[in-house]
Each structure stands twice: as structure tokens, then as C-alpha cells.
Amino acid sequence: MSSQKERLWWEREDLCYKDGHLFFSGESVTDLIGLTGTPAFFYTGKRILQNIERLHTALDQLESHKIFYAIKANRFAPLLTHIKDTGGCGVDVCSPNELLHAFSCGFIPNEISYTANSMTDEELKLLANNPDVVLNCDSLSTIRRLGKFCSHRKIGIRVNPAMGIGYRDNETLKYSGDKTTKFGIYREQFKAALQLAAENHFIVDTIHFHTGCGYLNNQLSIFSEILEATQWFLDNVKDLAFVNLGGGLGVPHDCDDEALNLDAWVSVINTHFDGKGITICVESGDYIVKDSGILVLEVNTVEKKRNTDFVGVNGGFNLAIEPTFYGLPCEPVVHRQKTDLMKPVTIVGNINESLDVWKDNFPMPDQIKEGDPLVFINAGGYASSMMSNHCMRGVVSENLLI
Ligand SMILES: Cc1ncc(COP(=O)(O)O)c(C=O)c1O
């Protein structure tokens, strides 16, 4: 078995070992948890801003663009306020409470897009009262019932191009595809949607689609096919000013993944939209926050059962459900650089569910012991925001480092 001193796939300037100790955002992880205890999420504001800046720089190659950060990925108020103050982007919300939360963090209506499904009349009334919020309607029912509360409003229509995209082509991460989904209006109902909009004197100025999550370079050809499939919708909208490509841009999850090449991504977009005078909008969540966060737990149980070496920690899948939901790889990282022999272990949480397994057969230092911190990277997106209090073990601190 090996000792590992070389740079690991996830290491970068603000997340790396220094003199053998794990540092995050310039602080030693041991010092950080000395202040907060565990379980604890830490987010780095600098990384979030770098991610937004990288997106802006790539999108600057287009005629015009807007970024709406999808707060469903992480709605921690200090993080949102930080994005509001310094990010140069708006936010996408998907429920009344998210809308009010965005307001309370300083975003004003025209900086907010609203993309939801199965909306209530109350929700539509709230949106009728906030005409500057950019509203993407995803069903005929939404357009029809919105008409009860307002008219002459600009709206977007979320369409479903019947093609999906996802991390490593994972079907469960696709929002549209072979299987009929609730997301957006299909081609065969699109003209009826435009008709309903016209009857209510709505101006359709946006076509929106979000077809899946986590895509990387290997999926760019599918991304291009999806953009091609949406052209028909665009061609049928006379007041079109915006095309919202949704979110879905992914980040590497293990050593086999390569970071998304944003220049290649933008050149796909340009191939389909250049010269059309359209503003391209994106609604990224993961790309902006996922790699900005870590979850720090503590090992409390090291024990062999039959042939399996278990490492039990003080937090379970209720704190970060995506690996279990979607089978996304998650990477446990030790706080001291591995210098000793490695052995395969099974890392488990503290929730009474058979699926509460962080990692099976994962190489860990032979000397890992009870009381050691254990860090999970890529915990900035869809971890705390999807968290539950199952087994009443949902107590965790969240901390923004800026
Ligand atoms: C409509 C919509 N927009 C944006 C997003 C953000 O996606 P991601 O975090 O993959 O960028 C989602 C995620 O579910 C979504 O449903």
C-alpha cells in the first residue's frame, strides 16, 4: 500500500495540505473545528466569488448574459448576502419562502427569477404582486391561473425539449428525457401555452429549460443537441429577448473527473445563439457553491465486524443526501496528510437507516482513530439545503469564511 505525498486531485490553493495539515480558506481545519465543534459546514466566500467570476468571464464571450444563482443549492443567509454584496449576479428561487428569503438577503425583484412547479394560487398571487420578478411558467395550468391575478405581465415559458443531461449520463439526474417528466411544456402543448399567454395579454419574452444536473465535458455534445432541440420553441416566440439555459454545470466529484471547460461550453452556446440578439441566462447552483464547502465530522467508532473495517462518524446521510439519492461520488479527506499504510474501510454515519453509508471500501490510513476529524469535500451545494432532522441528528453549524 502507498503513502501519498503528491498533490491530490481535489487540492487547490485554498483547500490543501500544508506541512501535513489540511487547510481550508487559509485556516487549519483543526483550528476551525476548535471554534465550532462538529458536525460543521464551512464555506469559503472567496471560492464562491471565483466561481461566479469564472462563469462571467466565459459568458462575456456572448453578446449579452445574466447569471441567476439557484439558491436551492445553498440558501445560508450570510452566503446569499455575500453574493448580493459582491457577486454581480441575481438569484433564482423556486418557492414563496425562497423568494421572501432572497428579499431578506437584499435582492430586489428584478434580480430574481422564479422557476417552480406545482404552484398554488397563493403563490401566483404573490408573483402577480411582484411583476418585476422574472417568472418562468412550467405548465398550462400556471399560465391559466396566473391570468386570474394579473395581465400584461412579462413571462417566461419553461419548455421540455424531451432530452436530458446529467453527471456521467446518470438517468436520475436528468430533468427531461425519454421518461415524461413534470418539468416544462412539451412541443405538442407549446402553441396552446402561447395561446393562453396571448389570451391573458402576457408577453412571452423568455424561453427557459433546465434539463439536468452535473454535466461535464463528456456531456457537451448532448448539451449541443439539447440547444438544437430548443430552436423550434425559440422560432415560435415573437417577443423573445432571453433564453435561460437553466443550471446543471457540474464540478469534479472524483479523480476520474475533469473540470468543465467553460470556453468549450460557451462555444457550444455561441454556435446556437450567436447573432440572434438574445440575452443568455444561466441558473447555476452547484457550479457556484458546491466546491466552496466542506463538511467536517468526527470519527467516533473504529471497529472490525466480520471482514469489514468500519469507521463511524457523527453525521449521516441526513446532512448530505446527494450521494445516496443520486449515487454521486463523495470524497472523504483526512485532516492530516496520509503518511502511513492505507486500508480499505467502510465509512458510516449515525442514522438508523441501511443506506447510511458514506463510502464502501475506501482507502483510509491504517492509523485512523476515534476522535479524528473527517472532512467531506464538495459539501457546499445541496447538502445543508436538503438536510433533514432524521433521528433528531440534524444539528450542525454553518459557517462562512470571507
Ligand atoms: C429550474 C432549475 N434551475 C436551476 C437549478 C440548479 O441546478 P444546478 O445546481 O445543477 O446548477 C435547478 C436544480 O434543480 C433547477 O431545477
Image: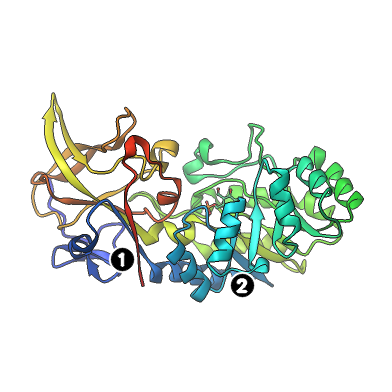
Its colouring scheme is rainbow
The mark total stands at 2
Q: Which residue appears at 63% of the width and 37% of the height?
A: 177
* Rendering coords of residue 332 (x, y %): 26, 48
| Residue 187 showing in the rendered view | yes
Image quarter of the C terminus: bottom left
Residue 61's disc is: 2
Pick the residue in front: 257 or 90. 90
Q: How crowded is mark 1: few (under 14 residues within 10 Å), some or many (20 or more)?
A: few
* Rendering coords of residue 163 (x, y %): 65, 41
* Rendering coords of residue 119 (x, y %): 68, 44
| Residue 283 showing in the rendered view | no
Residue 318's disc is: none
Q: What residue type is labelled 2?
A: Gln
* Rendering coords of residue 147 (x, y %): 84, 49
Tell whether 173 sits left or right of 61: left
Tell whether 51 sits left or right of 314: right
Q: What residue type is labelled 1?
A: Arg
Write down the residue under mark 1. Answer: 12
Q: What element carries label 2?
A: loop
**Which tag is nearer the camera, tag 2 or tag 1?**
1
Q: What element carries label 1?
A: loop
Q: Which residue appears at 67% of the width and 64% of the height?
A: 280
Pick the residue in front: 153 or 10. 153
